[in-house]
Image (cartoon, grey):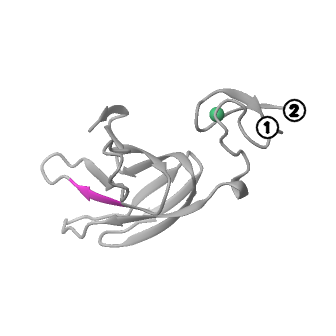
Amino acid sequence: MALIKCSECGKEISDKAPACPNCGMPLRSEDRGTYNVIVTRENQWFLINPAATITVDNVGKYELKNGSSIKIPLTTGEHTLLFSLGPRKTEAKINVTEDMKITMKMNRTTGEINVTGYKVDSKTNTPNISIGIGGSFFKN
Ligand SMILES: [Zn+2]
């Protein structure tokens, strides 16, 4: 038996448990809903315009070319998307509860990667995406 960290509440729990005893989060991905997170990169003209890399939860890697969209299937809960393009990195934390849309664009002045998104459910007004530049986080 190994101890793992619950992705929802952060408590250490047995990897054999079907659900977190603390918060009830199902531990097997098949017990959770899977949603499509569409990441769109705004079409922008730059002299050199390489594809950006999106690393999901430190594991899955996706390439995102200028002016294109990719679909990332994610289970319910928190996920971290690290956008990188050369030295520029932006980390976005998303709490997946439904199909979501995320937009990436480069800031022409600073060269930083801007990542924005919204929740369709207008009940919660709290933005569920933190945008970080250089590893630091701030809530918007
Ligand atoms: Zn938990």
Q: Position of residue 36 (x, y in %)?
A: 50, 65
Q: Position of residue 14 (x, y in %)?
A: 79, 32
Q: Indicate the amino acid at tag 1.
A: Asp
Q: Is residue 103 magenta?
A: yes
Q: Pointer 1: residues within 10 angstroms few (<14), some, or many (20+)?
A: some
21 vs 56, nearest the viewer: 21
> In the visual, does 7 lie left or right of 49?
right
Vertical placement of 41 versus 2: above or below? Answer: below
Residue at horizontal 19 percent and vertical 65 percent from the top: 46
| Quadrant position of ligand 1 | top right
Task: Kindly state the secondary structure of the residue where label 1 is placed.
Answer: loop
Q: Position of residue 128 (x, y in %)?
A: 38, 44
Q: Is residue 53 magenta?
A: no
Q: Pointer 2: residues within 10 angstroms few (<14), some, or many (20+)?
A: few
Q: Position of residue 23 (x, y in %)?
A: 64, 34
- Segment tinted magenta in the rendering: 102-106
Asked if marks 1 and 2 touch (Cβ < 8 Å), the reply is: yes
Residue at horizontal 24 percent and vertical 47 percent from the top: 112
Residue at horizontal 71 percent and vertical 45 percent from the top: 27
Residue at horizontal 43 percent and vertical 57 percent from the top: 53
Residue tagged by mark 1?
15
Task: Kindly state the secondary structure of the residue where label 2 is placed.
Answer: loop
Residue tagged by mark 2?
1
Vertical placement of 30 versus 140: above or below? Answer: below
Vertical placement of 8 versus 83: above or below? Answer: above
Q: Residue furthest left?
A: 109
Q: Indicate the amino acid at tag 2.
A: Met
Cα separation, mark 1 vs mark 2, equals 7 Å
> In the visual, does 29 lie left or right of 45?
right
